[in-house]
Image (cartoon, grey):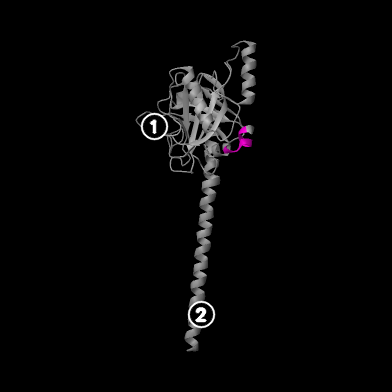
Amino acid sequence: MERQKKQMKRKKKSRLWILQVMLCVICIMSAALLYYDFVIIPRQNRELVEDLKSHFPEEFPPGGGSPTQKEEQAGRELEVPAVDFRSLQSQYPDVRGWLTIQESGIDYPVLQSSPEEPEYYLPRDYRGNYDINGSLFLQADCILGESGNLTIYGHNMNSGAMFGNLDQYASYDYWKAHPRVFFQTPGGMEEYQIAAVLKADVSMFDFQRTSFQSPQELEAYVAQAKALSLFETGVDGIGCEKTLTLVTCSYEWKQARNILVAVKTGA
Protein backbone atom coordinates (compact mmCIF):
# COMPACT_ATOMS: atom_id res chain seq x y z
CA MET A 1 0.00 0.00 0.00
CA GLU A 2 2.78 2.41 0.94
CA ARG A 3 4.54 1.57 -2.27
CA GLN A 4 1.44 2.40 -4.32
CA LYS A 5 1.10 5.75 -2.54
CA LYS A 6 4.69 6.62 -3.40
CA GLN A 7 4.13 5.67 -7.03
CA MET A 8 0.99 7.85 -7.17
CA LYS A 9 2.91 10.78 -5.67
CA ARG A 10 5.67 10.36 -8.23
CA LYS A 11 3.07 10.27 -11.04
CA LYS A 12 1.41 13.43 -9.71
CA LYS A 13 4.77 15.20 -9.50
CA SER A 14 5.59 14.03 -13.01
CA ARG A 15 2.25 15.28 -14.35
CA LEU A 16 2.67 18.58 -12.51
CA TRP A 17 6.17 19.01 -13.93
CA ILE A 18 4.91 18.26 -17.47
CA LEU A 19 2.07 20.75 -17.00
CA GLN A 20 4.48 23.42 -15.76
CA VAL A 21 6.76 22.84 -18.75
CA MET A 22 3.81 23.06 -21.13
CA LEU A 23 2.64 26.31 -19.52
CA CYS A 24 6.16 27.73 -19.78
CA VAL A 25 6.34 26.76 -23.45
CA ILE A 26 2.93 28.34 -24.12
CA CYS A 27 3.98 31.54 -22.31
CA ILE A 28 7.24 31.72 -24.26
CA MET A 29 5.46 31.12 -27.58
CA SER A 30 2.79 33.72 -26.74
CA ALA A 31 5.45 36.26 -25.79
CA ALA A 32 7.33 35.52 -29.00
CA LEU A 33 4.17 35.99 -31.09
CA LEU A 34 3.34 39.24 -29.33
CA TYR A 35 6.88 40.49 -29.86
CA TYR A 36 6.65 39.54 -33.53
CA ASP A 37 3.25 41.25 -34.00
CA PHE A 38 4.00 44.39 -31.97
CA VAL A 39 7.71 44.90 -32.61
CA ILE A 40 9.10 42.93 -35.55
CA ILE A 41 6.25 43.40 -38.06
CA PRO A 42 5.77 47.15 -37.37
CA ARG A 43 9.55 47.65 -37.56
CA GLN A 44 9.70 45.82 -40.89
CA ASN A 45 6.77 47.85 -42.17
CA ARG A 46 8.35 51.12 -41.06
CA GLU A 47 11.68 50.18 -42.65
CA LEU A 48 9.88 49.26 -45.87
CA VAL A 49 8.17 52.66 -46.02
CA GLU A 50 11.32 54.57 -45.06
CA ASP A 51 13.22 52.70 -47.75
CA LEU A 52 10.57 53.70 -50.30
CA LYS A 53 10.71 57.37 -49.31
CA SER A 54 14.51 57.44 -49.32
CA HIS A 55 14.62 56.04 -52.85
CA PHE A 56 12.35 58.77 -54.25
CA PRO A 57 13.41 62.08 -52.65
CA GLU A 58 12.06 65.19 -54.30
CA GLU A 59 14.82 67.08 -56.04
CA PHE A 60 14.71 70.59 -57.39
CA PRO A 61 15.99 70.58 -60.99
CA PRO A 62 19.55 71.99 -61.15
CA GLY A 63 19.42 75.59 -62.37
CA GLY A 64 15.65 75.43 -62.66
CA GLY A 65 13.13 77.74 -61.06
CA SER A 66 13.46 81.11 -59.46
CA PRO A 67 15.27 81.82 -56.17
CA THR A 68 11.89 82.31 -54.52
CA GLN A 69 10.70 78.89 -55.67
CA LYS A 70 13.92 77.33 -54.39
CA GLU A 71 13.45 78.98 -51.02
CA GLU A 72 9.86 77.73 -50.81
CA GLN A 73 11.00 74.25 -51.80
CA ALA A 74 13.78 74.25 -49.22
CA GLY A 75 11.46 75.55 -46.51
CA ARG A 76 8.88 72.91 -47.25
CA GLU A 77 11.44 70.12 -47.23
CA LEU A 78 12.71 71.19 -43.83
CA GLU A 79 9.18 70.80 -42.45
CA VAL A 80 7.91 67.73 -44.32
CA PRO A 81 10.28 65.87 -46.64
CA ALA A 82 8.62 65.35 -50.01
CA VAL A 83 8.93 62.62 -52.61
CA ASP A 84 9.49 62.62 -56.34
CA PHE A 85 6.08 61.49 -57.55
CA ARG A 86 6.99 61.18 -61.20
CA SER A 87 9.64 58.60 -60.39
CA LEU A 88 7.58 56.98 -57.63
CA GLN A 89 4.50 56.47 -59.79
CA SER A 90 6.55 55.16 -62.69
CA GLN A 91 7.42 52.21 -60.46
CA TYR A 92 4.29 52.06 -58.28
CA PRO A 93 1.43 53.53 -60.33
CA ASP A 94 -1.21 52.93 -57.64
CA VAL A 95 0.44 55.42 -55.27
CA ARG A 96 -1.79 58.51 -55.22
CA GLY A 97 -0.22 60.54 -52.45
CA TRP A 98 1.88 60.64 -49.31
CA LEU A 99 0.23 61.36 -45.96
CA THR A 100 2.20 62.81 -43.05
CA ILE A 101 1.18 63.88 -39.56
CA GLN A 102 4.32 65.01 -37.83
CA GLU A 103 5.43 63.15 -34.69
CA SER A 104 2.42 60.83 -34.84
CA GLY A 105 3.98 57.86 -36.62
CA ILE A 106 1.76 58.53 -39.65
CA ASP A 107 4.05 58.96 -42.64
CA TYR A 108 2.92 56.63 -45.41
CA PRO A 109 2.18 56.36 -49.12
CA VAL A 110 -1.53 56.36 -49.98
CA LEU A 111 -2.61 53.77 -52.53
CA GLN A 112 -5.76 53.53 -54.63
CA SER A 113 -7.16 50.50 -56.43
CA SER A 114 -10.06 50.02 -58.83
CA PRO A 115 -13.77 50.38 -57.94
CA GLU A 116 -14.08 46.64 -58.64
CA GLU A 117 -11.67 45.89 -55.77
CA PRO A 118 -11.79 48.99 -53.56
CA GLU A 119 -10.09 47.40 -50.51
CA TYR A 120 -7.30 45.69 -52.46
CA TYR A 121 -4.62 47.42 -50.37
CA LEU A 122 -6.27 46.80 -46.99
CA PRO A 123 -4.20 43.59 -46.54
CA ARG A 124 -1.31 44.49 -48.88
CA ASP A 125 1.72 46.77 -48.96
CA TYR A 126 2.50 49.21 -51.76
CA ARG A 127 4.15 46.42 -53.75
CA GLY A 128 0.98 44.32 -53.65
CA ASN A 129 2.44 41.76 -51.23
CA TYR A 130 0.44 40.50 -48.24
CA ASP A 131 1.09 42.59 -45.12
CA ILE A 132 -0.91 42.35 -41.90
CA ASN A 133 -0.60 46.14 -41.56
CA GLY A 134 -1.96 46.73 -45.05
CA SER A 135 -1.62 50.22 -46.54
CA LEU A 136 -3.36 53.55 -46.31
CA PHE A 137 -5.69 53.76 -49.30
CA LEU A 138 -7.82 56.37 -50.97
CA GLN A 139 -11.51 55.65 -51.47
CA ALA A 140 -11.88 54.19 -54.96
CA ASP A 141 -14.21 56.88 -56.33
CA CYS A 142 -12.11 59.82 -55.10
CA ILE A 143 -10.44 61.76 -57.92
CA LEU A 144 -7.41 63.90 -57.13
CA GLY A 145 -7.91 67.47 -58.29
CA GLU A 146 -11.68 67.00 -58.68
CA SER A 147 -13.25 65.51 -55.54
CA GLY A 148 -14.25 68.01 -52.87
CA ASN A 149 -13.51 65.43 -50.18
CA LEU A 150 -10.75 62.84 -50.18
CA THR A 151 -11.35 59.92 -47.82
CA ILE A 152 -8.38 57.82 -46.73
CA TYR A 153 -8.69 54.52 -44.85
CA GLY A 154 -6.21 52.46 -42.84
CA HIS A 155 -6.04 49.71 -40.24
CA ASN A 156 -6.26 50.60 -36.56
CA MET A 157 -3.22 48.51 -35.62
CA ASN A 158 -2.55 47.85 -31.92
CA SER A 159 1.14 48.39 -32.66
CA GLY A 160 0.42 51.97 -33.74
CA ALA A 161 1.22 51.25 -37.40
CA MET A 162 -0.93 52.78 -40.17
CA PHE A 163 -3.86 54.54 -38.45
CA GLY A 164 -3.18 52.83 -35.12
CA ASN A 165 -2.59 56.21 -33.46
CA LEU A 166 -5.65 57.90 -34.91
CA ASP A 167 -7.75 57.07 -31.83
CA GLN A 168 -5.36 59.16 -29.71
CA TYR A 169 -7.06 62.18 -31.25
CA ALA A 170 -9.89 61.53 -28.79
CA SER A 171 -7.64 63.53 -26.45
CA TYR A 172 -7.83 67.30 -26.86
CA ASP A 173 -4.17 67.57 -25.85
CA TYR A 174 -3.12 65.13 -28.56
CA TRP A 175 -5.02 67.11 -31.19
CA LYS A 176 -3.47 70.32 -29.89
CA ALA A 177 0.00 68.81 -30.36
CA HIS A 178 -0.78 67.38 -33.84
CA PRO A 179 -3.29 69.74 -35.51
CA ARG A 180 -1.95 69.60 -39.07
CA VAL A 181 -2.04 67.00 -41.83
CA PHE A 182 0.22 67.14 -44.88
CA PHE A 183 -0.85 65.38 -48.05
CA GLN A 184 1.47 65.39 -51.03
CA THR A 185 0.12 64.41 -54.45
CA PRO A 186 1.54 64.80 -57.97
CA GLY A 187 0.01 68.30 -57.81
CA GLY A 188 2.18 69.32 -54.85
CA MET A 189 2.21 69.48 -51.07
CA GLU A 190 -1.05 70.48 -49.35
CA GLU A 191 -1.55 71.41 -45.72
CA TYR A 192 -4.80 70.68 -43.88
CA GLN A 193 -6.01 71.77 -40.44
CA ILE A 194 -8.00 69.23 -38.41
CA ALA A 195 -11.45 70.73 -37.86
CA ALA A 196 -13.26 67.79 -36.20
CA VAL A 197 -12.49 64.58 -34.34
CA LEU A 198 -15.42 62.22 -34.07
CA LYS A 199 -16.54 58.67 -33.45
CA ALA A 200 -19.40 57.83 -35.78
CA ASP A 201 -20.59 55.43 -38.43
CA VAL A 202 -21.63 56.14 -41.99
CA SER A 203 -25.32 56.37 -40.99
CA MET A 204 -24.44 59.23 -38.62
CA PHE A 205 -21.90 60.97 -40.84
CA ASP A 206 -21.41 60.33 -44.55
CA PHE A 207 -17.61 60.23 -44.62
CA GLN A 208 -17.81 58.42 -47.99
CA ARG A 209 -19.11 61.51 -49.76
CA THR A 210 -16.73 62.83 -52.41
CA SER A 211 -18.55 65.60 -54.31
CA PHE A 212 -20.52 68.73 -53.43
CA GLN A 213 -22.76 70.87 -55.60
CA SER A 214 -21.68 74.13 -54.02
CA PRO A 215 -19.19 75.60 -51.52
CA GLN A 216 -22.08 75.77 -49.06
CA GLU A 217 -22.54 71.98 -49.24
CA LEU A 218 -18.86 71.48 -48.48
CA GLU A 219 -19.10 73.86 -45.54
CA ALA A 220 -22.17 71.94 -44.33
CA TYR A 221 -20.14 68.69 -44.47
CA VAL A 222 -17.56 70.23 -42.14
CA ALA A 223 -20.29 71.72 -39.93
CA GLN A 224 -21.93 68.31 -39.53
CA ALA A 225 -18.59 66.78 -38.55
CA LYS A 226 -18.03 69.55 -36.01
CA ALA A 227 -21.50 69.00 -34.54
CA LEU A 228 -20.44 65.40 -33.79
CA SER A 229 -16.88 66.31 -32.77
CA LEU A 230 -15.58 65.22 -29.38
CA PHE A 231 -14.39 68.77 -28.71
CA GLU A 232 -14.21 72.20 -30.34
CA THR A 233 -11.09 72.85 -32.39
CA GLY A 234 -11.75 76.43 -33.42
CA VAL A 235 -11.24 75.42 -37.06
CA ASP A 236 -14.28 75.67 -39.33
CA GLY A 237 -15.07 75.02 -42.96
CA ILE A 238 -15.96 78.57 -43.96
CA GLY A 239 -14.31 79.26 -47.30
CA CYS A 240 -12.46 75.94 -47.46
CA GLU A 241 -11.93 74.54 -50.94
CA LYS A 242 -11.74 70.86 -50.02
CA THR A 243 -11.51 68.42 -47.13
CA LEU A 244 -9.45 65.42 -46.18
CA THR A 245 -11.21 62.71 -44.14
CA LEU A 246 -9.19 60.03 -42.34
CA VAL A 247 -11.05 56.90 -41.24
CA THR A 248 -10.18 53.82 -39.19
CA CYS A 249 -12.03 51.33 -37.00
CA SER A 250 -13.26 52.11 -33.52
CA TYR A 251 -14.84 49.56 -31.20
CA GLU A 252 -17.58 51.30 -29.23
CA TRP A 253 -20.20 49.64 -31.46
CA LYS A 254 -20.17 47.39 -34.53
CA GLN A 255 -19.75 50.00 -37.29
CA ALA A 256 -18.00 52.67 -35.21
CA ARG A 257 -15.16 54.59 -36.83
CA ASN A 258 -12.51 57.03 -35.63
CA ILE A 259 -12.77 59.97 -38.04
CA LEU A 260 -10.72 63.11 -38.58
CA VAL A 261 -12.04 65.82 -40.91
CA ALA A 262 -9.41 68.32 -42.00
CA VAL A 263 -9.80 71.42 -44.16
CA LYS A 264 -7.31 72.66 -46.73
CA THR A 265 -5.48 75.82 -45.74
CA GLY A 266 -3.65 78.40 -47.83
CA ALA A 267 -3.97 79.13 -51.50
Please, what is the three-letter code of the amino acid marked with disc 1?
A: Pro
Compared with 250, 137 (above or below) is above
Examine the rendering and report whether any part of residue 260 can be seen.
no
Q: Nearer the viewer, residue 2 or 160?
A: 160
Where disc 1 sits, the SS reads loop
Q: Is residue 177 magenta?
A: no
The residue pinned by badge 1 equals 118
Q: Who's the residue at 47% across and 85% down the image?
A: 4
The residue pinned by badge 2 equals 9
Upstream in sequence: badge 1 or badge 2: 2
Q: Is residue 171 magenta?
A: yes
Residue neighbourhood size for the residue with mark 2, other residues' Cα within 10 Å, grouped as few (<14), some (14–19), many (≥20): few
Residue sitting at the far top: 66
How far across and how far down the image is residue 47, in percent? Answer: 55, 37
Examine the rendering and report whether any part of residue 44 can be seen.
yes
Q: Nearer the viewer, mark 1 or mark 2?
A: 1
Q: Nearer the viewer, residue 193 or 53?
A: 193
Q: Main secondary structure of the magenta part?
A: helix
Cα gap from disc 1 to disc 2, whole angstroms: 63 Å
Where disc 2 sits, the SS reads helix
Residue sitting at the far front: 227
Q: Who's the residue at 50% across and 79% down the image?
A: 10
Task: State which region is magenta.
Answer: 170-175
How far across and how far down the image is residue 255, in percent? Answer: 43, 40
Residue sitting at the far left: 116
